[in-house]
Amino acid sequence: MTILSECHHKTGGDPRTLADYVALRNEMNKLIHPARPDVNWQQAEKFCLSLFEQNGTELQTAAWYTLARTHLSGLTGLNEGLSLMNSLVTRHWGNLWPQQVPVRMEILATLSKRLKQALRSWPLTSADLSQLNQAREHLLVLDETLRRLELTPVSQLDTLRSHINSATVRLGNSDKIGEKPVTATAEAETPASGNPSEAAGGVKRAHEPEPLLETVKGSPPPLNPWKPFAGGMATMLLLAGILAGGWLAMHQSDPAQEPVAVTLSPLPATRSVDRRLHPTSETDIRQTQQQLEQLLQLKPDWTLSYGDSLVQQALRLSPEEGKALAHQWQQQKDASALAPESLTGWHQGVTQLEQLAKRLNALNEQKGKYMTVSELKSAIFAITQSLNRTVPVEEQLRQLSVTPAEQSSNAVRQRQVEQHLQQLIASYAALKQTPTE
């Protein structure tokens, strides 16, 4: 059998139009089919290798390949797959398909869940310690890479790493006391340990200069007090004039650059609440009220529209250098928008539901016609897949409202809602820019 590590692979693009990808996806969908048919892991591996040859390596097929190798070759296959995932995430994250970060995180989270289920069913012995340690090292590299990208909690790979850590510790202890091999199902799940919080040290004291001690050796001869005073004042005026002239020369704005500098000034920030503020006047309150009214009138895609105007300004000022900036900005907007298939999932699910209702109504009118349980299950499964392709924001908000704030999943749900809202706004802004026929 050809192992991927022996093959030269490159990053690939969107494989969804390829026949092998469609066949592979149908095979992997058996994992969530209500009838629970067996997955042909050997066939799935062949599809993956064929896609790597035709299209190159992308995240979704690599994740399925990792799962297939794990089921076929155990811990050895797991390490082969994790090595491939490490290579993609650490070296090719910038140009990896799919481009949408939430979709990538969903792929990694699903892979972590499936691998954990597979590990739970295996009887592990002390002979597996080296393979488990290797898998843990792969996961540590992945975790560190995602931590730099601030995506560690969303990927859920830390739960898989915690599972392997617990299995390694148990095997080490059982090897010392001569216990029987254990399985991972006895594990009490514990969250992956994050970075330990730093100990609160003492408050650093500000540097206090030592007092200057002046030793008076004797009484000086009496001096005229006006002469030193007049000389000091003249020196101060001279220095003040020199400093003022230099400051004006340094801060004199270029009339040609002043309008651009104004447009690129940082957005205003509010004062920190822990500072002592002067009493607020009625004018301040009135201006604050006006500012709040203006904020309420801003459109949801204001930040993107503002960014577009800045890019157009850069193109007018420096066409050559502005082109690279405009291209980068467009790539960032495209990456933050929803995937095309996410826009049609809910509509397709509702359409399939209406078709099923019409079919059932038609059967009631025809005697002797009926629908088998298997046909009904398959129809409901297809509808569920379409509806779950993109969960509406309303449902995400409902889930967030019933999740206790102290649960660790609450932060993950909040991040998912924020990403979904940003995607919707980016897609809305892109539709506004599309010319109407």
Image (spheres, rainbow, N blue to C red):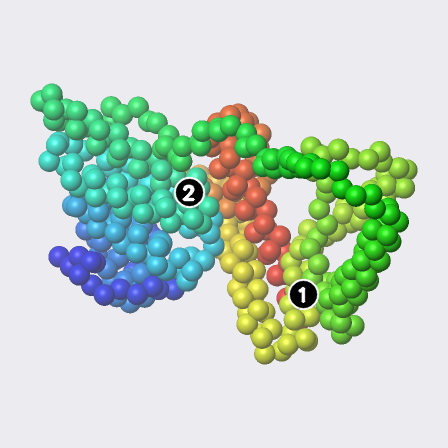
Which residue is found at the position 73% from the left and 71% from the top?
257
* Residue 324 sits in quarter: bottom right
Q: Residue type at mark 1?
A: Leu
The kind of secondary structure element at disc 1 is helix
The kind of secondary structure element at disc 2 is helix
- Per the image, the residue denoted by label 1 is 310
In the figure, is residue 117 to the left or right of 298? left
In which quadrant of the rendered image does the C terminus lie? bottom right
- Per the image, the residue denoted by label 2 is 152
Residue 52 in view in this figure: yes
Q: Nearer the viewer, residue 275 or 285?
A: 275
In the figure, is residue 205 to the left or right of 91? right
Q: Around disc 1, counting alpha carbons within 10 Å, would you say few (fewer than 14), some (14 to 19), or many (20 or more)?
A: some
Q: Nearer the viewer, residue 161 or 211?
A: 211
Give how far across and how far down residue 172 sits, in percent. 16, 28
Say if 225 sits above or below 48 in the image.
above
In which quadrant of the rendered image does the N terminus lie? bottom left
* Residue 370 sits in quarter: top left
Residue 385 in view in this figure: no
Give how far across and how far down residue 64 sits, in percent. 29, 50
